[in-house]
Image (cartoon, helix red, strand yellow):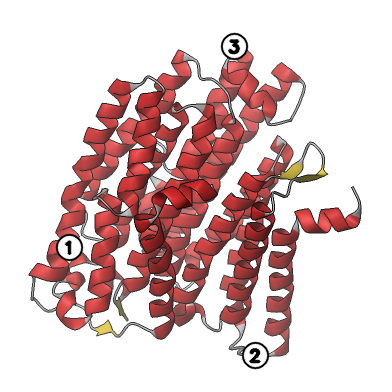
């Protein structure tokens, strides 16, 4: 393949690299640059636009055969992940307006995510996973506002390293069983009776469970979400989770699942739904509550793998889009305060409607969607997943998943009660919402409305 075709196939990645170079130049050229947010937002939106244009043009290519390729479905996934990062960068302007490290780390992590989505070999997958994850360990410590941040970053680093080691062990066993590092060998191993291949599959799945915070591999998530700043928590909850799940669905491809694999992919995600929703009810930290909510949502996402091969990708991408925009909408609308720990307490949402009506409405809308209330995007996403599970013949698992999903309604409605039905003054002094955060809210609200009103049209694009 000539260099022009390679440049076109990797255009989103090259635009991210261009953004990284410009950020480095801005850091070297000015002591306090005001253009960092503009450069990073422009880079991710340019990458998202390039991926979308190539996808709608039906572009497919394999610039590095056997290792890296793009198809219209992969490009759609890249466009969604990159676009979801723009609101994160906007809401980070208050905390990291002059901090080039934050923007460089985010774009570097995004570059790894893009590689991950196009990986055709386990070598590329490993490179993408590490490039995506390593910057996030440092991001948790940026804007250090509470003592727990160091502990949270360490726990995330240790368990992230455990996930990497588990992944590499699974890949080595799979290579021993098949003699190949192509990701297609994973789909073949799913139906294999060879003990070595089965052990490899379990280890690789466990590594993805660790990255996605599925019970019992979830313990890093509450601490990391609570210890990080709001933009970093939003990035971990949305973009990192999206990258992990979209890479996993690429691994499974069109493979048929054995009964034992069905039980594994149903039991642990089901436990995640129940545990995540029940534990979230006891939380008084908003970010910690969202962490347990994300543990439950990871269970819903892995449930999509029970569906037929041709429906897995669509279900996961649609869920990532609906879940992502609503989580970002909630984070962008949160009130801020100088005391980060006090501001994170749910008591600070009491009577928010009287002080910030737009923010309260946006958070309330996000909570209702995450709870799966129709006709909001969260309901459509859950409906699509459970419909596919039933169509695949796993009616019992679908019913149990539906029951588990509605356990979470309580804590979502509790947040709404604080927003609209309480008039007590907050414990922390709340700052007014900044224009950048308002822009991030609007940037999330528009696709949320489109997905709610025209879900069939959106599904057609996927």
Q: If you read the primary sequence from the N terminus, does the residue marked by circle 1 or circle 3 appear first?
A: 3
Q: Residue at x 59, y 81 (%)?
A: 38
Of residue 247 and residue 292, the one placed in the foreground of this image is 247
Label at residue 151: none
The extreme right residue here reads 2
Q: Which residue is mark 1?
A: 416
- Residue 354 sits in quarter: bottom left
Residue situated in front as seen by the camera: 376 or 223: 376
Which picture quadrant has residue 167?
top right
Kindly check if marks 2 and 3 are in contact, taking CB atoms under 8 A apart as contact: no
Disc 3 is placed on an element classified as helix
Question: Seen in the image, is 262 located left or right of residue 390?
Answer: right
Q: Is residue 231 above or below residue 426?
A: above
Q: Which of disc 1 and disc 2 is earlier in sequence?
A: 2
Q: First in sequence: mark 2 or mark 3?
A: 2
Which residue is drawn at the image coordinates 59% and 57% (left, top)?
Answer: 79
Q: Which residue is mark 3?
A: 195
- x and y percent of residue 326 in the render? 36, 59
Q: Are marks 1 and 3 in contact (CB under 8 Å)?
A: no
- Label 2 sits on residue: 31
Mark 2, Cα crowd under 10 Å, few <14 / some 14-19 / many 20+, is few
Tag nearer the camera, 1 or 3: 1
* Residue 426 in sight here: no
Where 374 falls versus 20 (above or below)? above
Secondary structure beneath dot 1 equals helix
Q: CA distance from mark 2 to mark 3?
A: 58 Å
Q: Is residue 285 above or below residue 276?
A: below
Between marks 2 and 1 in the image, the one whose residue lies nearer the viewer? 1
Picture coordinates of residue 393 (x, y %)?
A: 37, 19
Looking at the image, residue 21 sits to the left or right of residue 269; the answer is right
Q: On the rendered structure, is 385 left or right of 122?
A: left
């Amino acid at each position: 393949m000539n260099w022009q075709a390679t440049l076109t196939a990797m255009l989103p990645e090259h635009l991210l690299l261009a953004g990284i170079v410009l950020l480095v130049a801005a850091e070297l050229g000015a002591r306090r640059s005001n253009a960092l947010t503009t450069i990073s937002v422009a880079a991710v939106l340019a990458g998202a636009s390039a991926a979308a244009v190539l996808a709608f043009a039906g572009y497919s290519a394999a610039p590095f055969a056997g290792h890296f390729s793009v198809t219209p479905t992969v490009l759609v996934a890249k466009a969604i992940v990159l676009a979801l990062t723009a609101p994160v960068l906007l809401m980070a302007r208050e905390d990291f307006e002059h901090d080039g490290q934050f923007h460089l780390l985010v774009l570097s992590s995004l570059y790894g995510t893009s590689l991950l989505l196009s990986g055709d070999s386990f070598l590329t997958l490993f490179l993408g996973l590490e490039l995506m994850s390593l910057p996030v360990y440092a991001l948790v410590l940026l804007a250090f506002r509470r003592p727990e941040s160091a502990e949270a970053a360490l726990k995330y680093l240790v368990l992230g390293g455990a996930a990497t080691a588990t992944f590499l062990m699974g890949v080595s066993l799979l290579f021993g069983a098949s003699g190949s590092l192509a990701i297609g060998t994973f789909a073949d191993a799913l139906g294999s009776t060879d003990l070595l291949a089965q052990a490899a599959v379990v280890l690789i799945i466990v590594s993805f469970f660790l990255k996605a915070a599925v019970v019992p591999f979830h313990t890093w998530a509450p601490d990391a979400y609570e210890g990080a700043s709001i933009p970093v928590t939003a990035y971990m909850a949305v973009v990192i989770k999206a990258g992990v799940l979209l890479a996993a669905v690429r691994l499974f491809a069109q493979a048929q699942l054995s009964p034992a694999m069905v039980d594994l992919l149903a039991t642990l995600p089901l436990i995640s739904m129940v545990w995540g929703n029940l534990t979230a009810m006891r939380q008084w930290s908003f970010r910690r509550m969202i962490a347990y909510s994300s543990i439950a949502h990871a269970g819903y996402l892995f449930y999509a793998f029970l569906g037929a091969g041709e429906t897995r990708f669509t279900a996961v991408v649609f869920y990532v889009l609906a879940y992502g925009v609503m989580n970002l909408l909630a984070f962008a609308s949160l009130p801020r305060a100088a005391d980060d720990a006090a501001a994170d307490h749910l008591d600070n949402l009491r009577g928010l409607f009287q002080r910030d009506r737009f923010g309260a409405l946006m958070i309330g809308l996000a909570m209702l969607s995450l709870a799966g209330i129709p006709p909001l995007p969260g309901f459509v996403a859950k409906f699509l997943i459970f419909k596919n599970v039933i169509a695949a013949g796993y009616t019992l698992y679908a019913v149990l998943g539906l029951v588990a999903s509605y356990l979470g309604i309580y804590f979502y409605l509790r947040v709404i009660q604080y927003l609209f039905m309480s008039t007590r003054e907050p414990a922390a002094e709340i700052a007014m919402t900044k224009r950048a955060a308002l822009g991030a809210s609007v940037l999330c609200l528009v696709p949320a409305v489109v997905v709610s009103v025209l879900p069939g049209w959106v599904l057609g694009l996927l």
